[in-house]
Image (cartoon, rainbow, N blue to C red):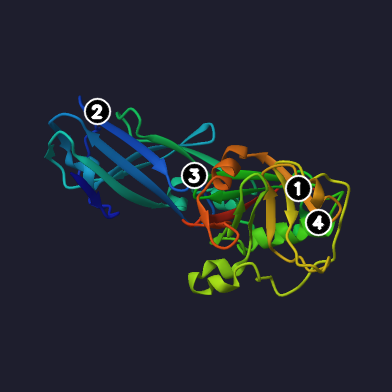
Amino acid sequence: MIRTLASFLFACALPMAVAQDIPGVRTTLVAEPAMVRGAEVSLRLSIEVSQDAEIPADLVTGCMLDVKVGDQAGPQVRDAGKGGAVQFAAGTSLSRVIKLPVARLAPNAKDSIGVTSLALAWPGLTGANCVVQIAPDLSKISIDQLDLKKTKVVLVTNYGEMTVAFYPEKAPETVKNFLKLAKDGFYDGTKFHRVLRNFMIQGGDPFTKDDSMQARWGQGDPGYKLKAEFNDTKHARGVLSMARSQDPNSAGCQFFVCHAEAPHLDNQYTAFGALESGLDTLDKIANVQCGGPERSTPLQPVKLEQAILMPVMK
């Protein structure tokens, strides 16, 4: 039997008992996603019961978390539930989503220009812990303030994360453009719409946010075109490059990541960065089942949930 509870918290002042490990009960806590840019953290608490057990109701309807911000002890979350206990039969699985404001977990995160790391743990429960990264507020930062060589972008997908480092000495304007689009949230919610195993994965088209516009996927742009910055960077596995039409100066926002070496693209497309980590995610995406005339359209969406700028100042 599977039970799914909507996310709800009871803000009453009733005392909560610290839950303890229960024989035959396994708990896990996962941040979804593990890196957050925004005002809210979403956590999934899962409970799996392998033998009949009595479980504190607060575990099902409340929230108890100890927070560690970096190396320092942070706030404690104590939202009492209904109290008492609930009987669960063997074979029961329960999954619930808990949403909490970032400001409650890390009050000073909004003032940081770096990533804030939070370690969250439900006291007394082995396995009910996770780490979530809080991206900085970039609203007051301009691209000209960034050290382009050291600044990264984390591509958060539904298949995992990929971290990109850049080559501003090879393609400075292309790097600035990509960072600006990421900073502005332009890529959030787009899809990798073209996937060819042992070649590349392509994304960044704003039209892919709308399934009803699938006939136009691959044609979207940011409203302008970039001048090509072809260079001597080889299109090796993990290299990030700009997609374009037959016109060399037609790139705008669409990009691709090479899954394998593609020497025929060298000096023909603007390579401007490479994966620093996440080759396993690249492999997962490159191996999804595809259809369509070119056999390159994923049968299940490959979502770029967020492109998160990780700034390093000059």
In this rendering, the label closer to the viewer, 3 or 4: 4
The spot of residue 275 in percent (x, y) is: 69, 42
For the view shown, which residue lies furthest in the top direction? 23
The residue mark sitting in front, 1 or 4, is 4
**Which numbered mark, 4 or 2, is in the foreground of this view?**
4
The mark that comes first in sequence, 3 or 1, is 3
Q: Measure how far apart labels 3 and 1 are at the Cα level.
A: 23 Å
Question: Sequence order check: which comes first, mark 2 or mark 3?
Answer: 2
With respect to residue 54, does 12 lie above or below?
A: below
**Mark number displayed over residue 273:** 1
Residue 216, how many percent across, how many down?
60, 73
Provide the residue designation for mark 4: 269
For mark 2, does the 10 Å Cα neighbourhood hold few (<14), some (14 to 19), or many (20 or more) residues? few
Residue identified by numbered label 2: 20
Q: With 147 as the anchor, is 6 left or right in this view? A: left
First reached walking from the N terminus: tag 2 or tag 1: 2
Label 1 with label 4: CB-CB less than 8 Å: no
Q: CA distance from mark 3 to mark 4?
A: 33 Å
Q: Secondary structure at mark 3?
A: loop
Q: CA distance from mark 2 to mark 1?
A: 48 Å
Q: Report if residue 214 is visible in the image.
A: yes
Q: Residue at x 39, y 51 (%)?
A: 100
How much space separates mark 1 and mark 4, taking CA atoms? 12 Å
- Of 89 and 239, nearer the camera is 239
| Three-letter residue code for mark 4 | Tyr
Distance from Cα at disc 2 to Cα at disc 3: 25 Å
Q: Is residue 258 above or below residue 223?
A: above
Labels 4 and 2: the sequence-earlier one: 2
At label 1, which amino acid type do we have? Gly
